Image (spheres, helix red, strand yellow):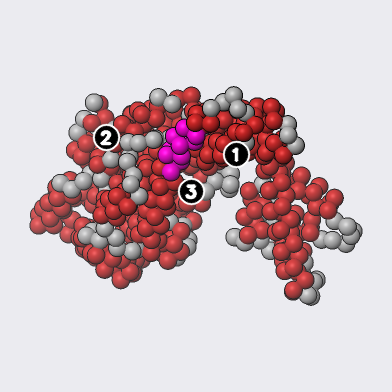
Amino acid sequence: MNALQELADMMTEAEQMAFVHYLSKKNKRKDTVNIALFNSLKTDDINLEINAFEGKKNTNAYHALRKRLYDSMIDFMANRSFENDTSEENTILRLIVVSRLFFEHTLIKTAFKCLAKAEGIALGIEHFSLLNEIYLTRIQYAHFNLSEPIEEIIGKFKANKKQFEYEQQLTLGYAVLRRELAAIYHEGRIVDFQALLQDTIETHGLSLQEGLTFKSLYQILFIANEYASLNNNYALIQPFVLKSYRLISKKNLLADRHLYYHLYILYFIANSYFRNGQFQKSLDYLDLMSTALQKQSGKYYQRFCLRYFFLLAFNENCLGRPQKAIEIAEQSLSLSKKTAPNDSNDIRLMLIVFYLQQDAGRNAVKEMARLNHTDSWYEKKMGMDWTIKKCLVEILLHAQQENTELALSRIKSFKRRYKKYLLTVNEERVVHYLLFVEQYVLKPEIIQTPKFKEAIEDFIITAQNVPKDILIMSFLSWLLAKVRRKTIYETTLNLITQYFHSTDAE
């Protein structure tokens, strides 16, 4: 997708109409075709833009037109954002700017009133960087207000500065860790993430119990969630996640003011419960997330809805309601294209697994056909771990459909591309698992030989002795179902019970 199309997709219908009006007023010549170019972006026909300008021989002029339209779109969206931004942060900024203007024109009383109002709002939303500006401005002009002790203002400045600096250090540490995570996921970089995490905490002097705000808790939980994902062990982080949320819940009045971060926090907690097999508790937090998604006129609905539906469907599937889970997944994929592609890929892969569990192979094949990019593309966009799971699901689908040649071809390319990487990151069990699948594809009757059955049962027991991961069970269940001559879904539910015992009932 080109940059023009991406910007156009960000706009609502009302914004698109307003932009056309903006261009009309801006155009000084009647033969300007920038509106026609913009309108061509709003159709699904990818050839329309080219056809609409097919008669233009001057390629440079065409690209110049695209560049001018791109610049106009950015200017329009920037101006509209400032005009429509009624956030408290923007209000504070305006008050600081106008207070400095009043000081310059010696409207001292009005200037201090503006700063006092800005301070009250900034304290309410714990915006330390703006409070820093407010206190510096008050100190700069303190000679105009001799009735207020300057030591009192300086004291506020220093106390806020400490919190501001902690927030900055946390952001620096968060940035370092996110870059490493990106390299791990998208480049397959081999990193001792636990050592890196500890080193980052020490280097930046971070305390995970100090100065928690909604933003800082989001940053901490993001890293904790990714750490658990890399280690396939969400039990490690659950006590910390819940303790942190209890601390931040005391600031309940701030939740709506930090809705973006609050939604992420609720998602992380719901995900932690789900990955630890506590499905009902996960649903409880998803209910809170659903309520939060409707706030502020659904401002963040498109941003978070697919993540919400992803966890909701998975929980329903694990609670023995597979048809409801499939309906949720199918309906969520029909939502607006403005949702994040990565999230829709997650749901599509999950839906394919659901279809496999219900022996709905034809539906699974249709959905898999929509994941039509190369492995290299998915590694860059979705990450190494996701791409490996996608390839494994594809292999199981071909095996399930008895497409022997396709299954063996994908197994061969999988081993060639990922075997070395998996062994390097100590994921030998994936290599062993694939070996069992390959043996079954080559000779299906082997599944009922005592030696092979025993090897599979031993492999499942070994897999249960390592940190529990509910997603890995979907793969184990497929193989175990063949051995025990049970349905994949029934085997999955039984394996979940074995893995997590009665943790969901606690």
Q: Quick check: 303 above or below 296?
A: below
The residue carrying pointer 2 sits among few (fewer than 14), some (14 to 19) or many (20 or more) residues within 10 Å by Cα, namely few
Judged from the image, the secondary structure of the residue bearing numbered disc 2 is helix
In the rendered structure, which amino acid carries the disc numbered 1?
A: Gln
Q: Earlier in the sequence, mark 3 or mark 2?
A: 2
The percent position of residue 197, horizontal first and vertical second, equals: 30, 51
Give the numbered dot on residue 344.
3
Range of magenta residues: 154-165
At horizontal 72% and vertical 63% (from top left) the residue drawn is 66
The percent position of residue 133, horizontal first and vertical second, equals: 56, 40
Gap between marks 1 and 3 measured at Cα: 52 Å
Query: Quadrant of the rendered structure where residue 148 is?
Result: top right
Q: Quick check: 465 above or below 213?
A: below
Give the numbered dot on residue 239.
2
Q: Is residue 402 left or right of residue 124?
A: left
- Towards the viewer: 45 or 112: 112
In the rendered structure, which amino acid carries the disc numbered 3?
A: Ser
The percent position of residue 332, horizontal first and vertical second, equals: 50, 41
Q: Is residue 15 visible?
A: yes
Judged from the image, the secondary structure of the residue bearing numbered disc 1 is helix
Give the numbered dot on residue 140.
1
